Amino acid sequence: MNTSELRQPLAGTVLAELGALAGSGGLYTDPGDCWAYGYDNSRRHALPRAVFFATNHEQVMALIALCNRERIPLVPRGAGTGTTGATVPDQGGIVLSLERMNRILSVEPENRIARVEPGVTNEALQECISKHGFFWPPDPTSAAVCTIGGNLAYNSAGPRAVKYGTPRENTLGLRAVTGEGKEIRTGVITTKGVVGYDLTRLLIGSEGTLAVITEAVLKLTPRAEAKRTMQVSYRDVRAAARAVSAIMAQPVIPCALEFMDGAAIGMVRSYSDLALGEAVGALLMIEVDGPLHGLTEAVAAVSEAARVDGCLSLHIAESKEEVAKLWRTRKALSPALRNIAPKKINEDIVVPVSRIPDLIDGLDRLAEQYQVPIVNFGHAGNGNIHVNLLTNPDDKAENRRAETCLDAMFNLVLHLGGTLSGEHGVGLEKRDFIDREIDPTTLDLMRRIKAQFDPNRILNPGKALPDQSPGGGES
């Protein structure tokens, strides 16, 4: 089906059925109302033909059944904070907004679980369970607005993943509706369970291409008794990378180990009140948590590992105010980048921690070769580095160089034994690169799994996998 057909209004009978299913205020069809639901943080945009606001599981089942019957693409959406275009309705169709399914159904401290709907924000969940002395480890930077459904769809984690894991390690079970419109329940509500295949982990990270999650059973973690925060500066990124390897090679695992290179530090100097001298070429932000008894020894062990050759200073915060001040540098980076390079190319690649020095060296060579400024920061404890290529969107020659540089960067990452995405996902942005990482036999198996869950290919078609056959259209 061509582009003009994809943009045509839905048939009157279909609209009437959608309206009756959605109820009052539950369906947008006016282009002006739908416009905001056609984008995500990738800055891609495509106008959906309708936006459906589900409020319960049964509505989701009925909507997917209708879309199957009419062969209408359906794109699940949380809050639109993703960066890869996974929620952009590039094939038209209907956007299924889950933002109104935002109930915390139960919290069971004795079982260390919470049951939630997908539209609950990460921050709302954390505030609720903190009253019981718990937290859910995934903590993306966008926690204030991103939804649990989105966290699960992308397997988004954040700084604490280095110690506590990603959503896959912190979710016990799911209730979902497949692309065929059938309800499934996966996983368990216990911390052990090995009956059947692990469909919970399969759905987490699948970017809404297999099923729509309508409920999740989350594994909660008790809050640590105490935490210490330190900031360590280095002469250059190679020294910082060596420190990361040394820290991760000793027994104490930090609960956060964040990295900023010299270019990133230079950008935040005017946004931060910390006195970072010109000699500082890289920075680590480190947090260590655990029982109060023994924490001093744990901090000492991490500090000793961090003091590699090239370490300029190590400062441990002594108060909540000082902790906030230390983190201000890291938190100032995103707004600084947005101001300086609003059209930057942001990639969250991952390499083994021991290969971070090789990655940084390789990125320096690529930046020089293609004359593209590159800013690096991210979750160093996992080897998850956010690589930012700064480009002027109006400079066509520079953009061509940046795309070629990006291509070479992906080859570098794979050469180092890494992966093309740690937590941002694939969506549309990386879809056409993943056959470099995944072999043809495995890709074929993944396509067949997709066909089992979604035989009519109506659920988020064209995302995550490079489809060799024509994309799923709509009628």
Image: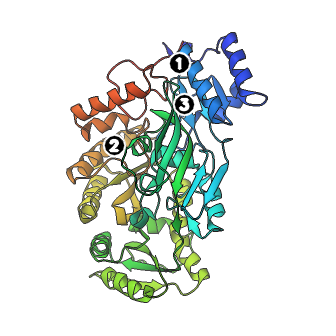
Identify whether 352 is placed above or below 149.
below
Residue 47 in sight from this viewpoint: no
Q: Is residue 131 left or right of residue 262?
A: right
Circle 3 residue: 75
Q: In terms of sequence position, does the residue under pointer 2 or pointer 3 come before the other? A: 3
Res. 433 image quadrant:
top left
Q: In terms of sequence position, does the residue under pointer 2 or pointer 1 come before the other? A: 1
**Mark 2 and 3 residues: CB-CB less than 8 Å, in contact?**
no
- Cα distance in 3D space between marks 2 and 1: 42 Å
Residue 80 x, y percent position in the rendering: 58, 42
Residue 109 in sight from this viewpoint: yes
- Tag 2 secondary structure: helix
Circle 2 residue: 401
Q: Identify the amino acid type marked 3.
A: Val
Residue under the image location 44 percent in, 40 percent down: 203
- Tag 1 secondary structure: helix
